[in-house]
Image (cartoon, rainbow, N blue to C red):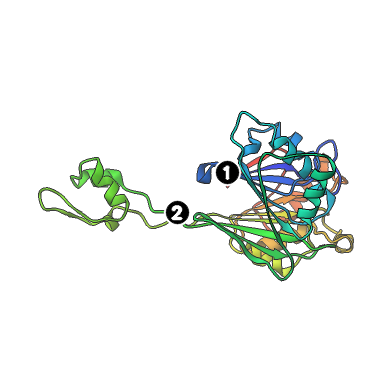
């Protein structure tokens, strides 16, 4: 499981940072990529990665500001051009209005897609668990921005315990079908009468990963709830230390507030995202240094950076 940042800037693109989009790469887990937000130019950034657009099976939109959705029509249209690959449907999750935006853009531009889009819209009264599969559950909760905006909590379900093959061999179990039965939790009896209990050779289930990806927001308790014990918290850092007033006025957070959220939630790692163009390269290290006084395991991400979870 990895996160690749396709756009880490706030509001408008700069030479160093494109606008908001990131890819949660679940290739080893379910052979899919989930996109979170799709600002203008997202498909151009994808061209600089190994991501195959057809692998993008779900797109989660945090809110309807342009720097988070203007890349959707282009990406969806280009995704259809890979004629040498199987056409696969796509799910889009987001606030009410995202369906109208996408369909209007496609209709006005005369775009025809050879695959179906399944829309899952929500409002303040229909949040909570928005998706559950056999391996993942996704929750959404309202944040505190200038328009309706949500954060997402992606929870991987507990992983099955691993089979101790060396211990089985030492117990005299021949490699083959018996290994499969034991792996499936079935006790077996060997030819010499020895009983092999599966629980003695399978480790306890491993907890799945928790990834929290927040949209634009002021510091709010909802952010903390979404990030409780998260392995990774992706939090906006539009402003820096001392900018609390302007951050509140514009519906955003500072690096210090993001660090406070991570500390209060007991998150394991904080990734600062959505960086204002006012911060030059020389300022980035200070953003990290200041935030680290509140939450030590913090990193300021940049475009195309890939982070293993």
Mark 1 or 2: in front is 1
Residue 159, label in figure = 2
Disc 2 packing (10 Å; few <14; some 14–19; many ≥20): few
| The image quarter in which residue 248 lies | bottom right
- Determine the image quadrant of residue 147: bottom right
- Dot 1, how many residues are within 10 Å of its Cα: few (below 14), some (14-19), or many (20+)? some
Mark 2 residue element: loop
Residue 32, labelled with which disc?
Answer: 1
The spot of residue 150 in percent (x, y) is 73, 61
Element under disc 1: strand
Position of the N terminus by quadrant:
top right
Q: Earlier in the sequence, mark 1 or mark 2?
A: 1
Q: Position of residue 22 (x, y in %)?
A: 70, 45
Q: Identify the residue at image location x=85%, y=39%.
A: 14
Residue 19 appears in which quarter of the rendering? top right
Give me the residue at 25% from left, 40% from top.
Answer: 176
Q: Residue furthest left?
A: 192
Residue 227 vertical placement versus 36 (above, below): below
Q: Nearer the viewer, residue 255 or 104?
A: 104
Cα separation between marks 1 and 2:
18 Å
- Whether residue 25 is visible to the viewer of this picture, yes or no, is no
Q: Looking at this view, is 235 or 101 the one in front?
A: 101
Q: Is residue 275 left or right of residue 189?
A: right
Would residue 42 be found to the left or right of residue 136 on screen? Answer: right
Is any part of residue 297 visible from this angle?
yes
Are circles 1 and 2 on residues that touch, CB within 8 Å? no
The x, y position of residue 278, in whole percent, is 88, 46
Provide residue 298's location: percent of width, then percent of height.
68, 51
């Amino acid at each position: 499981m990895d996160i690749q940042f396709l756009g880490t800037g706030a509001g408008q693109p700069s030479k160093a940072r494109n606008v908001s989009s990131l890819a949660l790469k679940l290739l080893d887990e379910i052979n899919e990529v989930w996109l979170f937000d799709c600002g203008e130019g997202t498909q151009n950034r994808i061209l600089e990665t190994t991501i195959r657009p057809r692998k993008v099976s779900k797109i989660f939109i945090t809110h309807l500001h342009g720097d988070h959705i203007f890349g959707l029509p282009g990406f969806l249209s280009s995704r259809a051009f890979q004629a040498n690959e199987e056409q696969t449907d796509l799910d889009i999750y987001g606030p009410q209005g995202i369906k109208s935006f996408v369909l209007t853009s496609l209709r006005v531009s005369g775009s025809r897609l050879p695959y179906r889009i399944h829309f899952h819209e929500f409002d303040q009264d229909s949040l909570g668990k928005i998706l559950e599969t056999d391996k993942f559950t996704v929750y959404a909760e309202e944040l505190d921005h200038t328009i309706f905006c949500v954060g997402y909590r992606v929870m991987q379900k507990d992983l099955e315990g691993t089979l101790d093959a060396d211990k089985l061999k030492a117990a005299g179990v021949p490699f083959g079908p018996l290994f499969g039965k034991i792996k499936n939790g079935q006790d077996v009896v060997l030819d010499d009468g020895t009983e092999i209990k599966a629980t003695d050779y399978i480790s306890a289930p491993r907890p799945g990963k928790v990834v929290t990806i927040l949209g634009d927001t002021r510091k709010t308790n909802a952010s903390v709830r979404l990030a409780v014990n998260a392995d990774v918290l992706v939090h906006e850092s539009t402003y820096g230390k001392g900018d609390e007033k302007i951050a509140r006025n514009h519906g955003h957070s500072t690096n210090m507030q993001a660090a406070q959220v991570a500390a209060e939630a007991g998150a394991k790692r904080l990734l600062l995202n959505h960086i204002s163009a006012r911060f030059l390269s020389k300022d980035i290290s200070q953003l990290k240094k200041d935030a680290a006084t509140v939450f030590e395991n913090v990193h300021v991400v940049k475009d195309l950076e890939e982070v293993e979870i």
